[in-house]
Image (spheres, rainbow, N blue to C red):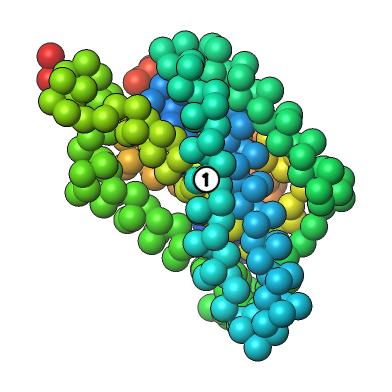
Amino acid sequence: MLSGYTFSELLSIFTMQGFAGLSLFSVFLLMALGLAVIFGQMGVINMAHGEFMILGAYTTYVTSNLFQAYAPGLFSFYFFVAVIVSFFVAGALGAFIEWAVIRHLYSRPLDTLLATWGLSLILQQVYRSIFGAKEVTVILPDWMMGALQVTDSIEIPINGLIVLILTLMVTIFMWVVMFRSRLGISLRAVVLNRPMAGAVGINTAFVDRVTFSFGCGIAGIAGCAFTMIGSTGPTAGQLYIVDTFLVVVFGGAGTLIGTVCSAFGIAQAQSVMEFFMSGSMAKVITLLIVVGILMIRPQGLFAVKVRK
């Protein structure tokens, strides 16, 4: 596979694919951060998580068109507005879904799987009815175009760097919410002992709704980042849902550092192998490696330590 390349060529290939993998890592991590809250903390198998990402992508598409039509002078700044709007739109839909469906299915993971799978099909059809079956592409501002020339053979896309910076900011925000905020303390209390948390005055139903909404909002931001590196279609979210669950389980459900390390490893492995073989074969080999590691360490890379 590596024969026929000189050392300098391999170095350039690995470097370029490494930077390309950072864009994939950003989408994986943003998706997995939201799913780590919903699945890792709440135990809800949300098969519609990819559709919340696509909702954020379509929200970004609509926002860019509105800026282009009604505020062309501010078009260069629409991305920052789209990030905030995507978070609140996806979060609002998540809060409604939790109230209408999910709250009746807690402690029934298989039922949540079936219900959210049906929800994903409904949302796909809604997107298809509103935006059409064809994929749409967001127009990027001029300052997001182009690449930084590192060497004669290595270029770093500017939009990829922006997505990576956004991912780092969201990750830090997620850490602050989970470990330095009242919501995070309440969430962890509910996860560890729901009856006792309710007994000390925590509104467990409200915590569940806000947590599910927050996870869906993070998925909306992932959709906003996704528009920077790819086109958006009604079924695009399903292409990432399996990888996202793989990232969460491989890293260790409920651990932030595990999610980051898992997303980075899987994204880099897929990106590098896709250069030397087909994309489907790269996914198969990555999956086999992850399954092999999970057979040895079923709790994932990082396990949550709980005092017994």
User: Is 276 on the left-hand or right-hand side of 25?
Assistant: right
Question: Based on the displayed image, in which of its 4 quarters is residue 159 positioned?
Answer: bottom right
User: Amino acid under label 1?
Assistant: Ala
Task: Give 238 or 279, whichever is nearer the viewer.
Answer: 238
**The N terminus lies in which quarter of the figure?**
top right
Residue 219 place in picture, x, y as percent: 53, 45
| Figure check: 140 above or below 96 | below
The residue lying toward the viewer, choosing from 214 and 274, is 214
Q: Residue furthest bottom?
A: 73
Instruction: Give the percent coordinates (x, y) of residue 269.
Output: 55, 43
Category of crowding for the residue at label 1, using alpha-carbon neighbours closer than 10 angstroms: few (below 14), some (14–19), many (at least 20): some
Position of 299 relative to 18 (above/below): above
Q: Residue at x 79, y 36 (%)?
A: 125
Q: Which residue is mark 1?
A: 92
Q: Is residue 293 in view?
A: no
253 horizontally vs 1: left or right: left
Secondary element under disc 1, as helix, strand or loop, is helix
Residue lying at 75% horizontally and 56% vertically, measured from the top left = 231
